[in-house]
Image: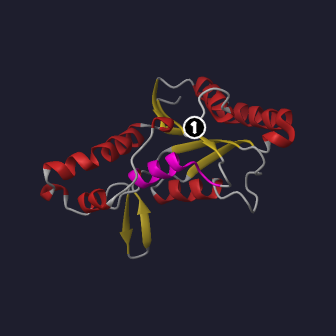
């Protein structure tokens, strides 16, 4: 049984979004006791010099302004920490992740909070969680040489400690939408079983 799901929607489209539709289906099938929803279409700030300065200031030495600057990042990280499973709706835009999803990654990948450096390399601090990424694309085949989104997301999640990552793929929708949706629905059933 899944207790808490963090649902992240990265599609800029609310109406007609395949990744949102499939993410809806997946969350219903998983039937968590609680769902935390983060809609990235509402926008996230990009990192700037002030944010970076606040982030690299020890927590006990931050000014109130620096703490305010990191407040959203702290909230986004707390959402991940609270969840057992992340369900991420990932449309592929121009061969990569949407800018809003990249902004989310930048806000949650924080040294000393979600990962740390060791003598043997980085170690993720958010272990024991699972991620299911629901991919939708018009023409990019998931896992192909021109797909810079799925490998990136697997790497980033692993970097922060989430190594159990599964994909549901409705790729190449502009080529054969029926086949793409049939594949995705079959994958959804298998993952939610």
Q: Is residue 77 magenta?
A: no
Left or right: 111 with respect to 3?
A: left
Residue at screen point 54% across, 54% down: 163
User: Residue at left 42%, top 63%?
Assistant: 123
How many numbered markers are drawn? 1
Residue that label 1 marks: 12
Residue 162 point in image, percent of width and height: 50, 51
Give left or right: position of 90 versus 136.
Answer: left
- Graded by Cα atoms within 10 Å as few (under 14), some (14 to 19) or many (20 or more), the crowding at tag 1 reads some
Point out the stretch of residues depicted in magenta: 96-107
* Rendered location of residue 90, percent (x, y): 61, 43
Specify whether residue 100 is painted magenta: yes
163 sits to left or right of 73: right
Of residues 3 and 71, the one drawn nearer to the viewer in this rendering? 71
In screen coordinates, is 43 left or right of 170? Answer: left
- The C terminus, quarter of image: top right
Residue sitting nearer the eye, 84 or 79 = 79
The residue located at (61%, 26%) in the rendering is 24
């Amino acid at each position: 049984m899944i207790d808490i799901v963090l649902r992240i929607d990265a599609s800029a489209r609310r109406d007609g979004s395949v990744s949102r539709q499939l993410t809806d289906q997946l969350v219903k099938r998983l039937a968590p006791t609680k769902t935390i929803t983060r809609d990235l279409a509402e926008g996230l700030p990009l990192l700037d010099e002030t944010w970076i300065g606040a982030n690299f200031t020890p927590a006990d030495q931050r000014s109130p302004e620096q703490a305010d600057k990191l407040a959203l990042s702290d909230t986004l990280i707390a959402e991940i920490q609270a969840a057992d499973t992340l369900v991420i709706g990932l449309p592929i835009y121009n061969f990569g992740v949407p800018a809003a999803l990249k902004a989310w990654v930048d806000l949650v990948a924080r040294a000393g909070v979600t990962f740390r450096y060791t003598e043997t390399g980085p170690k993720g601090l958010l272990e024991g969680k699972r991620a299911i990424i629901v991919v939708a694309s018009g023409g990019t085949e998931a896992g192909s040489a021109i797909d810079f989104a799925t490998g990136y997301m697997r790497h980033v999640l692993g970097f922060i400690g989430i190594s159990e990552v599964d994909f549901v793929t409705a790729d190449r929708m502009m080529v054969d939408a029926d086949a793409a949706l049939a594949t995705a629905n079959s994958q959804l059933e298998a993952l939610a079983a």
